[in-house]
Image (tube, coloured by chain):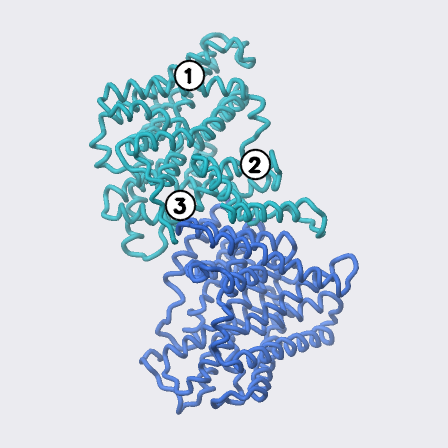
Amino acid sequence: MRLRLMVLLILLGSMAIVTRTQLIPIQQEVSSTLVLGFLLLTTYCFAFFLEKVGLPRITGFIFGGLILGPHIMGFFDTKAIENLNFLNTLALAFIAFSAGGELKLNNFRSRLKIILFLLTGVTTVVFVGVTTAVYLLSSWIPFMVGYNPMVRIAISAIFGVIAVARSPSSAIAIISETKAKGNFTDTVLSVTIVMDVLIIILFGIVVSFCQVVISAESTLNLTFFAGLIFEISISFVMGFFLGRAAVFLIEKVKVSFPVVLTAIGFIVIKFSHLLGNYLHDSLNIDLNLEPLLICMAAGFTVQNFSRHGPTFLLRMDRVSFPIYIAFFALTGASINLDILRSGWVLGVVIVLVRTVMLFLGSYFSGRLAGDRTLNYQNSWLGFITQAGVSLGLLTEVVRRFPEIGTPIQTILIAAITLNQLIGPIAFKYALNKVGDSNSNSRESLK
Amino acid sequence: MKLLIAIAIIAVISVVGANITFLDRRLPLGFRNILFTGAEYIFIGIFLGGMGLNILDNRTLSELQPFLIFGLSWIGFLYGVQFEFRFLRKLPRFYFSITAVHGVITFLLVTSFIFLVFRRMLGYSGESLFIISIVLGSAGACTAQSAIAIVSRNYRIKNRGLLDLLRYISSVDGLFALIFFAISLSVVAGFRSVSFSGTSVLIWSGVAMVAGLIPAVILILLSRVRFSQQEYLVFLVGTIMFTGGLAHYLNQSPLVSGLICGVMVANFCRHRLRAMEIVVHAEKSIYIILLLFVGASWQLTVDYSLLIAPIYLIARLIGKTTGAWVAVRVFKPRFKTPHSLGLGLISEGGLAVAMILEFCMFNTSYANFLMTVIIISILINDLLSPRLILAQFGESEVQLIKKTEF
């Protein structure tokens, strides 16, 4: 404990001397290498101290990033974070592969009924609950006041659909940290990951509805849904082939495949975006492959359609820690406190409503499906965290609805930030409570 | 977008390449040595760079600078962590003395030779004259280990003492080269400060030391806590990044700071072997990245740099031969040493590449010229060095182990 405190003080002290004083004449900006090295070591120490008081490590990484970042201590600016943005894409590819790899068909089959009930129940209750709550509050939300009831319903539905999104990355990080194993863990993870796929479809439906309602010229286009299903199917097929390529890498080429796979995942993500933009700009075709789905399907293929599933997960797990630290520390550093300040009141309301709905949805779905009492009483705690997917969907909202997108984004970023801070704590608590957590058996060198 | 594609391509090439290259292939010795040092990645870099596909153009390369800083710091750390004094003390002292004298003389001769040529023939003066000569002098003082490794793998050599000495010199002389390099960078920094004086040089040398010492203290402290394997990876990667980043931010050399950090860790860290194991694991990949950078940032122009390359080669040859000759005359090893021992030490690569690359990162005005010189020098030296090493032992003392040579 004392040694880590010393390390933390040395790191903070040296950074403060170097970046704040004029002892040495330096003209250049803080380089990304320095920021990343500093974040890795410092947020690790933060996380250690928070872990001592029972909080999950990823909360420490996020808080560490937030405190050291541009809005509080200001050791580096937003430009340094922007320069490291590619790391988020790399980490997302890695996390998507891992998420797919965590989905084991055997576990899935044995708990299919509970998973389906939870998916349907929680999605319906959260979507309807949050949409209704925002609609009822719309008279007090300044940017919604001028619209007619139908448009207000459409805008509320956007809030509702984004409330459904979860964070597989945080779930996997918490499970990895606590070494949790068991029915509860499998169920929460499966629901979270499958929801990541469903949210894309649900979001497409809601956005399509909103376009019809908000812009009078648009009409509900059924080919849109066919296109959506086509995109998802193609993504699955591509994911399957990518998974087979990963199996080839594991079997034939003795390379450090987590690195190669992450790089390939990264190319897939970027290629999907490029292809989508190209088809839209040149041929006026809206075909957006879902890169995260491709990576997830690839991980799923390796886990379930080859004999290398355990090796795959083990080797991915070996290099996962620095990736998680960098990803969550940068997430924390990117939290914009100004936005949080301006949208926090509505954000808190949405968080409260969403949390209540998550509880109701998961409690009754689990109970109806015949799950263990302890499980259905606590599973809502595993669904609170929101992160990358929700933020990605928000960007899409801003792109499609420029007039109303920005205020929606401000409010929801505040809500997502709060969920990101409390979600990991809640999930870790739930894992401990149901007895799936195994965090005391940490492997140690000494 | 180009940057992101470049990152992905570099990652795949470096990881896959680390597993399929640096092998002892069935080729004539010189070419075998070139492939063994991974020099082909310079050509892949050229292909990806401005003279080829233009994926790694100048802008992308400058955006990739954080990777370069990390790679240089990693190489410096790897080099430093091998210097465990407890272990080095067990070897005969004259090994070290010969290496030191050979390194110093080579550095001085190459630097002076280049200095004179540039001053008299090309009319250079002032800071640029000083910088070019001292940087080429430092790079020239390094010896790559690859050629000696190739020879010792394929030939049974009777004079083990001489072979061990060559191995020792090629492993350790980089330390002296890096010290000269560090001093020269401090002098350059001193030149650029408001008033150049001995004090400003000392201050900059101190800053370089601090940039390596602080991260070393951090890693040493972290090594004393309870940690898992994954945590140690974070400590190590974080420390090396912090070292490189801090050094770069302070206008110092990530390579030198990495070296200082590595030496400290080798001698004061409880888990130095674990650290070494991790850094060695990624060494090849990182070296490939550096070679790709060298190739990509090289713009071949037909100018005087093509003439300087042979001059540098000759200067280095003279430096190495004289340095080794003087050293063995002064310290007299207990085994037979040839007069032209220095010819067995001309293989170049690794650290020399890292030094030039790093220098070019800070000083773009000389980048292309220095790249041209060093690339030509590496290729020619690597091609010739295995034969020259064999010549040091004489035909009667060398026996081919496998029929691998054509």
Q: What residue is shown with label 3?
A: A320
Q: Amino acid at mark 2?
A: Ile
Q: Where residue A317 sits in the image (x, y, percent)?
A: 36, 46
Distance from disc 3 to disc 1, alpha carbons, whole Å, reads: 34 Å
Quadrant in which residue A110 is drawn: top left
Task: Pick the residue in front: B315 or A388.
Answer: A388
Dot placed on the residue nearer the N-terminal end, 2 or 3: 2
Chain bearing tag 1 is: A
Q: Residue at x 42, y 16 (%)?
A: A130
In the rendered image, the vertical position of residue A38 relative to residue B196, given as above or below: above
Q: Residue at x 35, y 51 (%)?
A: A257
Q: How many marks?
A: 3
In the rendered image, the vertical position of residue B225 relative to residue A160, given as above or below: below
Secondary element under disc 2, as helix, strand or loop, is helix
Q: Where residue B301 sits in the image (x, y, percent)?
A: 60, 64
Secondary element under disc 1, as helix, strand or loop, is helix
Q: What residue is shown with label 2?
A: A67
Q: Amino acid at mark 3?
A: Ser
Q: Do marks 3 and 1 both belong to one polypeptide chain?
A: yes
Distance from disc 2 to disc 3, alpha carbons, whole Å, reads: 23 Å
Marks 2 and 3: CB-CB under 8 Å?
A: no
Tell me if I can see residue B46 in this picture. no
Tell me, what hue is chain B?
blue
Q: Where residue B182 sits in the image (x, y, percent)?
A: 63, 65
In the rendered image, the vertical position of residue A9 relative to residue B266, given as above or below: above
Q: In the drawing, does residue A59 fall left or right of residue A300?
A: right
Q: What residue is shown with label 1?
A: A130
Secondary element under disc 3, as helix, strand or loop, is helix
